[in-house]
Image (cartoon, rainbow, N blue to C red):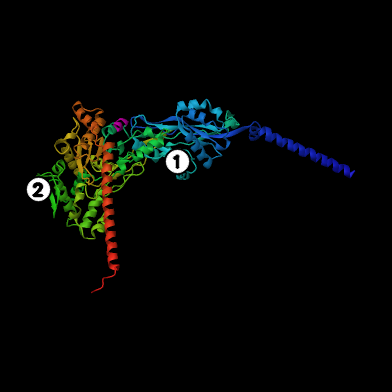
Amino acid sequence: MQRGNESGILEKAIYIAALILIVKLFFLQVLTPEYKLKAHDNVVKKVTIYPSRGLILDRNGEVMVYNDAVYDILVQWNITKDLDTLRLCELLNTNVEFVRLKLDEIKRTTPNKPTPFIKLLDGPTFARFQEHLFEFPSFSVQTRTVRRYPFQSGAAVLGYLSEVTENNIKQSSGYYELGDYMGTTGLERYYDSLLRGEKGYTYQVVDVKNTYKGKYKDGEEDKTPIAGWDMVTGLDAELQAYGEKLMQGKVGGIVAIEPSTGQILAYVSSPSFDPNLLTSRYRRHNFNVLFKDYYKPLLNRPIQAMYPPGSTFKAAAALVTLQQGVHDEKWYWFCPGGYRIGRHVVNCHGSHAVPDVQTALQYSCNSYFCKIYNDFIMDSTFANPAAGYQKWWDMMNIFGYGHTLGIDLKGEKKGNLPTVKYYNKVFGENKWRAATIISNSIGQGEVLATPLQIANAMAIIANHGYYITPKIVKYLVKDNQYRKPVVMRHETGIDTMYFRMVADGLEKVVLAGTARIAQIPDISFCGKTGTAQNPHGKDHSIFSGFAPKVNPKIAIAVFVENAGFGATYAAPIASLMVEKYLNDTIAKKRIPLQERMINAKLMKSEMELNSEQLIKQRKLDSLQKAKALKDSLEKAKIKKDTISKSAPKPKQP
């Protein structure tokens, strides 16, 4: 009886175990999607959906950067079999060598996951390949967007995208993956985290032939991408394009600022390039061409090129002298044609009388500004010249010289306003005075500034004593939410009456001084020319100014390398930019000036550059040969002397 009960219990246990096994198999093979997929030779593929990167617009709503669809072709190497290489090359418009090298690279790095094989494929080529995608089961397609630049301008300020590095991936906290693109320069880099949006993804069911069968779990685990923030800048797209046209064939930069807001109206780095060149499949080739270019079009000159500000520096120098009370605005000075320091003379434009500060600015008298600089630093109220120079340095620093201004771009340089510490190191403590560093007074010597700093200093004068942190972006917007960059108002502490005096002098510069060529019909234009000495070649042409005189709308700085006097190129270009912005057109009588500026080509041709390089190389070869000959003769002489000393002396008879 007991044995029968045990047998019944065992039988029931077997039935229960079998039932459990059947139920489990049912769940695994019928209700569990993964097993169901495998049973039908299907697989689940995670496909990244890239968000729409934020648009970039100008102040008038013109789109400066938008998105265009392109396609990446991906391949999973470990499931690639019997690849028809010739057919693949034909469809993708590539060559066998590229396919072989790319597959070898993927085999070494990421053989077990879909990896980009060809990136940024254009629409027509993609459409042709898609029709035959079933012939290549290990290949798949990923849609993404690239940036397009309808104005074909603003490369330095807008920036471009490039493929992420391993360091970028680490710093992005998991957002970026191998093969992604991110902002590398310009606004694209500075605001990358806002412009890029948030990636989405979808899980797709595909069969062994890579044919799409439907969404996994009806899309329950999919994530919708979130578009990036759109950006509205203070730039004027037409003014930007016009500035680049004026600067074609020239090296330098233009920065235009709206004084009341600090917003950048135009930002030109020349030579420039069409930013669309860095968005295609041939981006790497185009980048290498630009990178190797003698004139460095990838250099962001408005914030990274540092030049002597030349006589544009005199406007701020006049203001700090007036504020300090060293001389008043009516102080009289007779210029004998230069300022003498021992045997050294800072030349001026012939002998003339300077009855006031406005006349000094009007005719850009070097002697006058050397004198007031000397008197400032050597004033008896200071314990020593170093103390006087420190006070002068502090006041000039307030004008933005010697430090970064905080523009919303990476890589801004601070220029150079040499410190007391620097001069003590060079000359020795208490062993230098104003005359030792007199070139600073006219924006030469060790003083260096960026075009942005020069424009900002003029915006301070336009505002009669303050500036707003220069910014390119006005605001970013998404879903009716707004974000604005942080800006600050910076005061100089200089009395506004001195700014009125200096503004009057700057107006005279244009009306009857060194910048008469910059006169604009019916617009009061205040400005200052500059000619910066260049030890490596022809002087640089500089101009900075603002307009109109009352309630200024634009402050501007133009720098043209190796172009001679400030009035030759910089002043005319600045006046055309101002006229274009304020009037939206150029007066008929100034059209010839406009054409002359546009057509002026100051950059050397490739043939000239090659010729110069050949001459330099020949000189170098000659010097090296001469040195080699000299070394050879010296070695021969040493050898001869050694032999002579070691030879046995003849016996005396």
Q: What element does badge 2 sit on?
A: loop
Question: Are the residues tagged 1 and 2 within 8 Å (C-beta)?
Answer: no
Q: Nearer the viewer, residue 648 or 44?
A: 648
The residue singled out by tag 2 in the image is: 336
Q: Residues within 10 Å of mark 2 (few under 14, many from 20)?
A: some
Disc 2 residue type (three-letter): Pro
Q: What element does badge 1 sit on?
A: loop
Q: Position of residue 616 (x, y in %)?
A: 26, 45
User: Quick one: which residue is furthest to the bottom in this view?
Assistant: 653
Residue 31 visible to the viewer? yes
Spatial CA span between label 1 and label 2:
62 Å
Q: Main secondary structure of the magenta part?
A: helix
Indicate whether 653 appears above or below 70: below
The numbered mark, 1 or 2, whose residue comes first in the sequence reads 1
Residue 464, picture quadrant: top left
Q: Give the residues drawn in magenta, as a range.
A: 237-241
In the shown orientation, is residue 64 left or right of residue 172? left
In the shown orientation, is residue 403 left or right of residue 315? right
Residue 597 inside the magenta-drawn segment: no
Disc 1 residue type (three-letter): Val
The dot on residue 164 is 1
Residue 240 inside the magenta-drawn segment: yes
